[in-house]
Image (cartoon, rainbow, N blue to C red):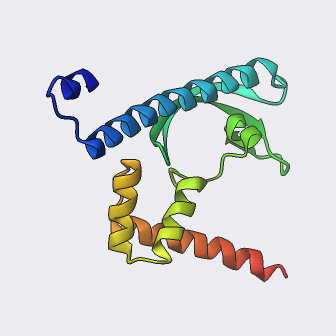
Amino acid sequence: MLNKMIAINEIEFNTLEREIYEIGCEYARRLMAEVLMQVDEIISKERDKKIYRHKGKRRTTIKTLMGEVEIDRVIYKAKGENGKTQHIYLLDKIINLNTYGQISSNLALKIAENASISSYRNTAKNITELTGQSISHGGVWNIIQILGKKIKELYTYF
């Protein structure tokens, strides 16, 4: 990719900056996926096998600041506190993975920050340009609604 640009004799800074940023994000996505899957593997080996029964892996995609991170994570079958069977991802529990749908909490925060100073349409455009995530103004609205409900829940306890 960079070889093609350099061979042109003229390098435009903004294009170079964007290309290097995309390469960095691609590397970061791969690293994130690798780290998460290694942690999941360690959890799988060290879990209490009497409580958590391995039920295979499921593929998921997490939309992050650096783009979409695809991982295969283990799902476990366990008895809940009420005695009912439940299916859980120990990885999510251990690393405190909080998402809003498939959107990471960091990305949701950036969406909320941007939406507080711009329209939902402009926020969608800005987030798409910054992260490479394809998000619509309706998607931005949905995230803001979810965050608003969470904030409301926090304040009803006080």
From this view, report whether residue 45 is shown above or below residue 72: above
Residue at position x 76%, y 36% from top? Answer: 78
Tell me if residue 76 can be seen: yes
Q: Nearer the viewer, residue 34 or 14?
A: 14
Residue 56 percent across, percent down from the top left: 59, 24
Image quadrant where residue 18 sits: top left
Q: Where, quadrant-wise, is the N terminus in this rendering?
A: top left
Tell me if residue 100 can be seen: no
From this view, report whether residue 140 is shown above or below residue 43: below
Residue 70 percent across, percent down from the top left: 47, 34
Q: In this view, does 154 lie to the left or right of 75?
A: right
Q: Nearer the viewer, residue 60 or 64?
A: 64
Residue 43 percent across, percent down from the top left: 75, 25
Residue at position x 68%, y 79% from top? Answer: 152
Residue 10 percent across, percent down from the top left: 17, 34
Counting every numbered tag in the picture gives 0
